Image (spheres, grey):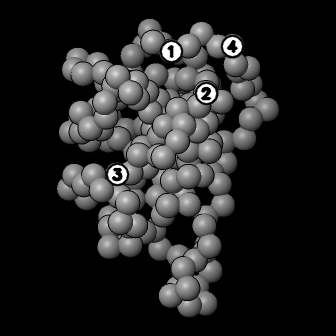
Amino acid sequence: MRSVLAFAICLGACSFSLPPESAPSPDAGAQSVDDAAPPTNAACPADYTLTAGAHKLLFTDLAYTWQDAQAFCAAHAGHLVKIEDAALDNLIRDSIDDAVTPFVWIGLYDPQQNLTYKWYDDTPLGAYKNFDATKTNGPCVDKDTAPAPKGTWHPWDCSFVQPGVCECDG
């Protein structure tokens, strides 16, 4: 169960812009970071050990705020995970010991807190959704890792610290 700590709700004063991209690798030549293509699985660091189809996942090493978890992922050639189907959602739930890590950040947020959710890359939430409508407390979204039928998503306070799930695109 989450601790009952009071955190200030972010109302218009928080920034949801993505952190700057990490510096290009030495083998990138003169190509600027802005011109660089998104990473592919071949470019994913070796610490992305959980693989499912085109998805390569990495769990953050520590607990972070949503923004800091996104920065951690960017520094590791990825982003907070974009969950577009039940198979990936269930894989994440089943790969985490909920007794140790009951919640993880995912790459979904609602910057205006008007139930218009976007992924980290500003694409809108698609057809697949797994919200627990009874728990809403902020613009950033986390996922509980409890066994089925749980594993639902919760809008939560972005300043709360917990691990996140990074994805390296393929």
Q: Callout 4: helix, strand or loop?
A: loop
Question: Which one is in front, 99 or 21?
Answer: 99
Pointer 1 residue? 2
Pointer 4 residue? 6
Q: Callout 1: helix, strand or loop?
A: loop
Amino acid type at circle 2 is Phe
Residue 45, percent from left and from top? 40, 67
* Label 4, label 2: how far apart the Cα atoms are: 10 Å
Amino acid type at circle 3 is Leu
- Quarter placement of the C terminus: bottom left
Local packing at callout 2 (Cα closer than 10 Å; few below 14, some 14-19, many 20+) is some
Which mark is nearer the camera, 3 or 1? 1
Pointer 2 residue? 160
Could you tell which of marks 4 and 2 lies nearer the N-terminus?
4
Q: Is residue 169 left or right of residue 12?
A: left
* Label 4, label 3: how far apart the Cα atoms are: 31 Å
Could you tell which of marks 3 and 2 lies nearer the N-terminus?
3
Residue 153, percent from left and from top? 40, 25
Residue 165 appearing in the image: yes
Pointer 3 residue? 57
* Label 3, label 1: how far apart the Cα atoms are: 25 Å
Residue 12, percent from left and from top? 76, 30
